Image: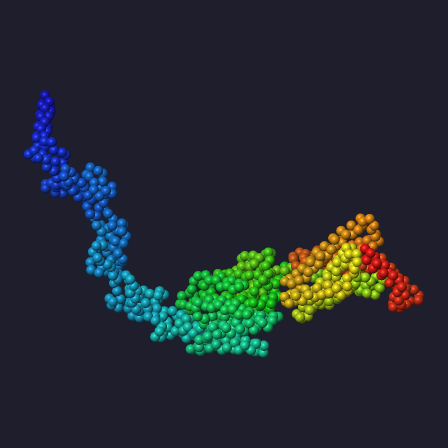
Amino acid sequence: MAGRWKLLILALYLCLIMGQSDLLNPGCREGFNGVENTCTDIDECEVDPDYPDDVGPCGEDTACHNTMGSFYCRCDDGFSSSTGALNFSAGTSATCKDINECFEDKDICGLNAKCFNAIPHYSCICDNGFISTTGMERFVHGDNVTCKDINECQEGDICGQNAACVNTPGSFHCVCNAGFGLQSGRSNFSGSQEQCEDICMIDRTICENGTCHRGASGHYCACHAGFTNYGNKGSRCTALNCDVFKVMNNLQEKFPDAHDLMMQLEKSCLNLTESENPTELDGEDILKRLLSVIDKLLSGGAFNDNRKVSTFLNLVENTLKLIAAFIKPPGTKRSSTHTELELLVEKGEDLPKGAVTLSSKQARLDIQLETAAGDPSYYPGFTTVSLLSYANLEDSADGFFTGMKPQANQGFELNSKVVTASVSNRNTSHLKEPVRLTFYHLKQTDKNNHTCVFWDSSEEGGSWSPRGCTVVESEPKYTVCSCNHLSSFAVLMALYDIEDKFELQLITWVGLALSLICLFICILTFSLIRSIKSPRTTIHLHLCICLFIATVIFLAGISRTESRVGCAVVAGLLHFFYLAAFCWMCLEGIQLFRMVVLVFNTNFKTLYMLAGGYGVPAVIVGISALANAEGYGTKKHCWLNLELIWGFFGPACIIIVVNIFFFLITVWKLAQKFSSLNPDFDNLQKIKAFTITAVAQLTLLGTMWIFGCFQFEEGTIVMSYLFTIFGSFQGVMLFVMHCLFSKQVREEYGHILSKCCAPWKKSYSNISYSHTSKAPASKSNQDTGESRI
């Protein structure tokens, strides 16, 4: 019962309160109060005096703004709403979070200052070494304050003795005065951790082979005898050998300019190594004179002596090393008649770094500057790299291959220009990092038969050697070499020659001896026996004469290479007479064509035949000699070299093609005449025999030179035997085809032999006279037969 009475009393109390509210706020909207029948605004943002620390209806870090009948919330300065709205109501989930001004605006503090975020604002503080213009430690963007550098060097002697203070933005450092340095080897310091000391006392090896002194402008080195710092007194003293410029007697006799230059270089070298105050050289002038001397030496023809080549290359390399130090950076590029030079110069206290490339029309050098400078302890204060390319030195340096290790039947020839690579590094015999040289070939070839070599002066007076060099890449147009030393370089191309076997030599000499005898008999036959004389026998006569003379010249002079001029003459004569033999074969083909196709006037005039047989080869040889006179004669034989060989093979191939063309037409016309209604079988059979003999003759001589084309490759011993057999016995074969196979010639031989063996021997002139009546008749029959056809 007591509980029920309590509930009843609570209900009555609530009714009274609600009734009172209705009486106080009769008909007013939410946010207003009714006072004496008037609705007034309720200030929701009013702070309760009893609870002044109450956060209010909006929460922390917010400001409450009352409005008529309501209110809104806004974040305090330095805060932003989590929803991004400027105003929000208390009933939402929006909260106010601090704005990080330092993150929003990176440059809010300006230069040389750091931004520090705070709640609700931020502050700016100048960096170390800077101070604000107002002297305030902290400031904000709107205060119109900047940070300026503090000049620490004005705060007293902070670097100590023998040093100078250098102010920098925000800091400072100390630099030792000239002639002083730090034990640590650093270039500058700050504070009092180190002190500058006499550099001559700190580094006892600063001058290396000299005495260190301290002067007003710094330290300087007084070099000992035999050493120099090339006029740069602050650099180390390095060794300089002046003996390399000793003058040779033959230079004074043949090349006065070279003699004078060597004397000047020796004098200048001694001045650098012996004088306390050496005179600085004019590098540009000496370089100009050096290139002029090289032009004169190379224009005089090949040296023909490996010791001269060694002396020449050593003088050039040592001269470049001497004068390069006196060329102004960054270097120079020069070219002359027989040379092309690029020279790079770097000067400074510190060793240069990085890769550089020097190039000419025929070669390229890729090298690291650290490699060119060498050991830092011997650094003379400069670094030089030079690449010198020679236009025709390969003529003098070719053929000296004692340093090579050839395979069986393998030979070599230079297939690039010779270049000299020189650097200031005093030790280039074994480089820490190899250099790369790219050579462009003189003769393009698809075969991978190139070798990278350098000129080794210690190898029996001088020779090409592959030691220390390898082929990185080889293409038809160029070869890339990697070498771990520096000198003069080139690229060799391997050639494969036939072996000088005894069997081949025996076949050659026996065959050529028999050929000479047979050719001589053919010449006597075609010139003295009147009964067989005709345009064809005239052609055969001159063909045999050409082969006879060519064989004699071959036996007498093919290996006489001692005299370059004499060897070239032998090669030119062989070129002429072998081409003449092909021309006379071509005339025979044309003559057969005329005999079959033409009915009248089938005979050539002798003058025309001589012009075609000897004039055409003379013109070809003359043009070849004018175009490439150096192509006549090789190092082993007096014949055409590979550059000029097509001066023979080209015309020979053309003649063979022309002959084949005429033979095909001749055979075709013969076939037509044999199938005609009234063929003249006797004369047609005769021309048929002539044609077969001419084709066999062309096959014999043409096949021989086809085999000759294969004499420049490896492993061609079979071709060598075939070429030797066909070449040596061609005279014998011609005698068999044109004399022994000819019934008319055999009859004349038999008649001559019968007369010679008769008891009443007559002279050769009487034998010829006794057959005078028979000879014109026979000739008349032959000519008549040719005309009738």
Give the residue displayed 25% in from the left and 53% down from the top.
Answer: 108
Asked whether the viewer can see residue 557, the reply is yes
Residue 626 vs 102, above or below: the answer is: below
How many discs appear?
Answer: 0
Give the residue displayed 79% in from the left and 51% down from the top.
Answer: 673
Q: Give the percent coordinates (x, y) of residue 683.
A: 83, 54
Q: Give the percent coordinates (x, y) of residue 589.
A: 75, 57
Name the quadrant of the C terminus: bottom right
Q: Nearer the viewer, residue 545 or 566?
A: 545
Q: Nearer the viewer, residue 674 or 644?
A: 674
Q: Nearer the viewer, residue 59 or 541?
A: 541
Report whether 241 appears left or right of 195: right
Report whether 727 appears left or right of 432: right
Q: Give the percent coordinates (x, y) of residue 120.
A: 21, 48
Residue extending furthest toward the left: 36
Colour logic = rainbow
Report whether 567 appears left or right of 68: right
Give the residue displayed 44% in from the left and 77% down from the top.
Answer: 279
Q: Quadrant of residue 691?
A: bottom right
Residue extending furthest toward the top: 1
Q: Give the percent coordinates (x, y) of residue 3.
A: 11, 23
Residue extending furthest toward the front: 600
Give the residue displayed 10% in from the left and 21% down from the top.
Answer: 1
Q: Quadrant of residue 301?
A: bottom right
Asked whether the viewer can see residue 576, the reply is no
